[in-house]
Image (cartoon, rainbow, N blue to C red):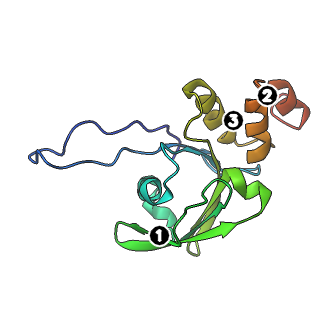
């Protein structure tokens, strides 16, 4: 899957009182990642219990059921220990590791795991779009904290990315 998804519009057909959860703003590497990240996710708010079901619901079912996620306590201080998703419960593990602060690890049972950059919800759209693209680029050598640091510094990161082993190096 490789898409930045847009929110669903309107109510479900035939039901004037239904609400469809907006699709997550997500971009994944097209195949196998060779870097520290497998893509990026840009949640709309910092309430993991609201955002996580849409994220896992948008992932390809062939990867298996998402059984656990690991998030940083600094970014998700109020994260619950479990989140309900359609048909199952997802265990939420909290980590104090600095690299986890701006990342989420999505474990899919025995099938594998994905490491995603979490773009802060209040990030401007143009910066978020660049981060989503950079994190989903298979040869990207930069970690989540490094990509966000470049964005904070107002750099586009191209020179740094190339000097640290990116496509142009």
Name the residue at 63% across, 34% down. 133
Task: Identify which residue, 128 or 114, lies in the foreground.
Answer: 128
Find disc 2 in the rendering and name its residue. Answer: 153
Find disc 3 in the rendering and name its residue. Answer: 134
Q: Quadrant of residue 88?
A: bottom left
Q: Which is in the foreground here, disc 2 or disc 3?
A: 2
CB atoms of marks 1 and 2 within 8 Å: no
Name the residue at 47% across, 63% down. 62
Crowding at label 2, few (<14), some or many (≥20) Cα neighbours within 10 Å?
A: few
Q: CA distance from mark 2 to mark 3?
A: 16 Å
Q: Is residue 109 left or right of residue 85?
A: right
Find disc 1 in the rendering and name its residue. Answer: 65
Q: Secondary structure at mark 1?
A: loop
CB atoms of marks 3 and 1 within 8 Å: no
Q: Which is in the foreground here, disc 1 or disc 2?
A: 2
Task: Identify which residue, 68 or 65, lies in the foreground.
Answer: 68
Residue 76 in view: yes
Name the residue at 70% across, 43% down. 138
Residue 134, how many percent across, how many down? 69, 35
Task: Identify which residue, 30 or 37, lies in the foreground.
Answer: 37
Residue 10 higher or lower than 101, as above or below: above
Residue 123, how many percent across, how many down? 59, 33
Single out the residue that lies furthest toward the front.
Answer: 78
- Name the N-terminal-most of marks 1 and 2: 1
CB atoms of marks 2 and 3 within 8 Å: no
């Amino acid at each position: 899957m490789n898409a930045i998804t847009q929110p669903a519009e309107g109510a479900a057909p035939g039901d004037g009182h239904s609400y469809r959860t907006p699709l997550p703003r997500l971009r994944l590497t097209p195949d196998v990642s060779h870097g520290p990240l497998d893509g990026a996710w840009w949640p709309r708010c910092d309430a993991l219990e609201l955002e996580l079901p849409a994220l896992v619901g948008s992932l390809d079912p062939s990867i298996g059921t998402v059984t656990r996620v690991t998030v940083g306590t600094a970014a998700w201080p109020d994260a619950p220990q479990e989140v309900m998703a359609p048909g199952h419960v997802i265990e939420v593990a909290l980590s104090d590791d600095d690299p986890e602060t701006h990342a989420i690890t999505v474990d899919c049972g025995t099938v594998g795991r994905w490491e995603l950059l979490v773009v802060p919800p209040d990030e401007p759209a143009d910066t978020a779009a660049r981060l989503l693209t950079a994190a989903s680029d298979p040869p990207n050598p930069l970690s989540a904290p490094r990509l966000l640091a470049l964005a904070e510094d107002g750099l586009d990161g191209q020179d740094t990315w190339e000097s640290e082993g990116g496509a142009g190096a």
